[in-house]
């Protein structure tokens, strides 16, 4: 099913005038037909009545038929194609693949279902999905808090070709073992969002409580105040960003209170181990976790430790993560605590551009606005502007390759309706006839793109449209 879908979408990129009919055959259509690209109802992995209702309501608010078609394809894509519901260790279990890679990323799985959190209170099936995913995240963290991706079977060996010979402490159940701060932040964000939306606390059992203690312990270890800690990673690869420096422990730092990250949210190696967006995300996540531990588990001691660590990281980021420019202060992307600072941004979230989206700062914060202007400019070496669009990419797919995710984040973090409309126009004209979002596309030729089935990007686009229908419905009426 995975291979056939991938081939289908590649075919559609070359022949966008073709439509996929529900009985599994192609038919030529006019450009205005916009036949749904969703799997037939009987082949969808998961169905939510609340999601279907919101999809119909939101689609009716979109005046542009192509944009409405893209929304219909993208918003339910995670549920349609990536969700496996079951039971693990006697509890509800939800395993969510990232799309065209048959493994579950802690980051992606959390982000993929985030747009549905708001609907969970009114949908028992969604509640079952979220409880299962919260349980699965706790299992994953108990297996290895340093891993970024996991196998469906907690006892299985990785089936990812590229991770078979990594020099690290690989464990059963782990698909890839790249240490990224956000891999532990996203499950907290999801759990906190689900709790706030539903009031349901049944998933926050002793196993979850123990996993959250492991999160706190891991963050403390990676402050590296007493040595490098237990994590190291090297990979034999012609791509330098696939491995880490100095026997896998990363470039030197001066311990200043921030958390070290060996890899970015892109799964690319950090240059300086203090990744600023990741640390700011950790501040927000730790404060959310402290709130949950107090209210749900009555664990004031661990909650106080979380709050204290959040304060320490915040102070360290303010002291070492700020670049003092001629027009005012703005955030660095990575630093080392010795005074060396790297400015860039990467489209993967957490990014500098996405800080307000993650509630790491206010959208009108002056430092963020200065940072945002720098990110969306040639001051950022991974900002690209071409005939097709402009946006942010990153080392992962190289120069000229714009990530739709960055365009979405620009729209999420703006209240300027002209700016938002421009973002929608770029997204609408760069899907290469597929009706789906991609990982990246060439700045001049959207037909050159990576990843035909990238569920996070698809669902994020749907989330953006729902957000705009609530905050700026006039943009959708005019689009």
Image (cartoon, grey):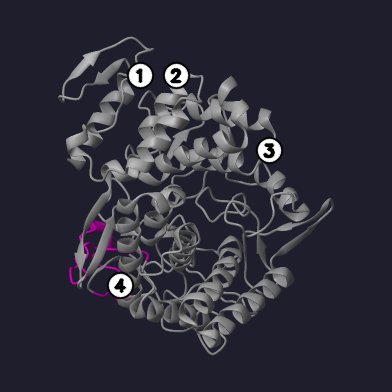
Separation (CA) of disc 4 from disc 2: 43 Å
What residue is shown with label 4?
139
Separation (CA) of disc 1 from disc 2: 8 Å
Q: Are marks 1 and 2 in contact (CB under 8 Å)?
A: yes
Q: In the figure, residue 132 lies in which quadrant?
A: bottom left
Q: Are marks 4 and 3 in contact (CB under 8 Å)?
A: no
Q: Are marks 3 and 1 in contact (CB under 8 Å)?
A: no
What residue is shown with label 1?
34
Residue 402 in view, yes or no: no
In the foreground, 328 or 203 = 203
What residue is shown with label 2?
65
Residue 433 in view, yes or no: yes
Q: Quadrant of the N terminus?
A: top left
Q: In the figure, residue 159 lies in which quadrant?
A: bottom left
Separation (CA) of disc 1 from disc 4: 41 Å
* Crowd band around label 4 with a 10 angstrom C-alpha radius: few (<14), some (14–19), many (20+): many
| Of pointers 4 and 3, the one earlier in the residue sequence | 4
Q: In the figure, residue 361 lies in which quadrant?
A: bottom right
| Of pointers 1 and 4, the one earlier in the residue sequence | 1
Secondary structure at badge 4 equals helix
Q: Are marks 2 and 3 in contact (CB under 8 Å)?
A: no
Identify which residue is drawn at 71% across, 70% down. Answer: 320
Name the residue at the bottom extreme: 226
Tell me which segment is drawn in magenta: 148-171
């Amino acid at each position: 099913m995975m291979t056939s879908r991938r081939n289908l979408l590649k075919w559609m990129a070359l022949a966008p005038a073709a439509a996929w009919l529900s009985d599994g055959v192609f038919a030529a259509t006019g450009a205005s037909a916009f036949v749904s690209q969703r799997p037939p109802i009987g082949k969808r992995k998961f169905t939510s009545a609340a999601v279907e209702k919101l999809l119909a309501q939101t689609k009716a608010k979109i005046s542009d038929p192509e944009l409405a078609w893209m929304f219909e394809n993208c918003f339910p894509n995670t549920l349609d194609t990536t969700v496996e519901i079951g039971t693990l260790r006697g509890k509800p279990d939800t395993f969510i693949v990232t799309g065209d890679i048959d493994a579950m990323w802690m980051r992606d799985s959390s982000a993929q279902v985030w747009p549905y959190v708001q609907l969970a209170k009114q949908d028992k099936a969604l509640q079952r999905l979220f409880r299962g995913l919260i349980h699965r995240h706790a299992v994953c963290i108990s297996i290895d808090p340093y891993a970024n991706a996991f196998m469906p079977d907690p006892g299985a060996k990785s089936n990812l070709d590229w991770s078979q010979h990594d020099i690290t402490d690989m464990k059963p159940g782990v698909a890839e073992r790249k240490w990224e701060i956000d891999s532990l932040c996203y499950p907290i964000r999801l759990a906190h969002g689900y709790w706030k939306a539903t009031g349901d606390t049944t998933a926050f059992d002793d196993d979850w409580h123990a996993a959250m203690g492991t999160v706190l312990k891991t963050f403390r270890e990676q402050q590296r105040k007493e040595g490098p800690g237990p994590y190291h990673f090297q990979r034999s690869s012609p791509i330098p960003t696939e491995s880490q420096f100095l026997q896998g422990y990363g470039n030197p730092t001066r311990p200043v209170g921030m958390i070290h990250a060996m890899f970015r949210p892109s799964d690319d190696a950090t240059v300086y181990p203090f990744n600023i967006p990741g640390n700011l995300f950790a501040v927000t996540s730790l404060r959310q976790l402290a709130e949950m531990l107090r209210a749900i588990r009555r664990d004031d001691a661990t909650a106080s430790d979380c709050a204290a660590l959040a304060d320490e990281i915040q102070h360290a980021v303010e002291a070492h993560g700020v670049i003092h420019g001629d027009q005012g202060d703005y955030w660095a992307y990575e630093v080392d605590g010795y005074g060396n600072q790297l400015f860039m941004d990467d489209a993967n979230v957490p990014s500098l551009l996405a800080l307000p989206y993650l509630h790491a700062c206010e959208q009108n914060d002056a430092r963020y606005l200065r940072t945002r202007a720098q990110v969306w400019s040639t001051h950022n070496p991974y900002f690209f502007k071409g005939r097709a669009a402009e946006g942010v990419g990153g080392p992962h797919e190289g120069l000229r390759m714009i990530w739709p995710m960055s365009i979405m984040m620009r729209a999420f973090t703006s209240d300027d309706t002209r700016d938002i409309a421009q973002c929608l126009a770029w997204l609408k004209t760069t899907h290469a006839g597929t009706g789906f979002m991609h990982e990246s596309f060439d700045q001049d030729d959207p037909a050159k793109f990576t990843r035909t089935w990238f569920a996070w990007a698809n669902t994020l686009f749907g989330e953006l449209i729902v957000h705009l229908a609530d905050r700026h419905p006039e943009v959708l009426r005019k689009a």
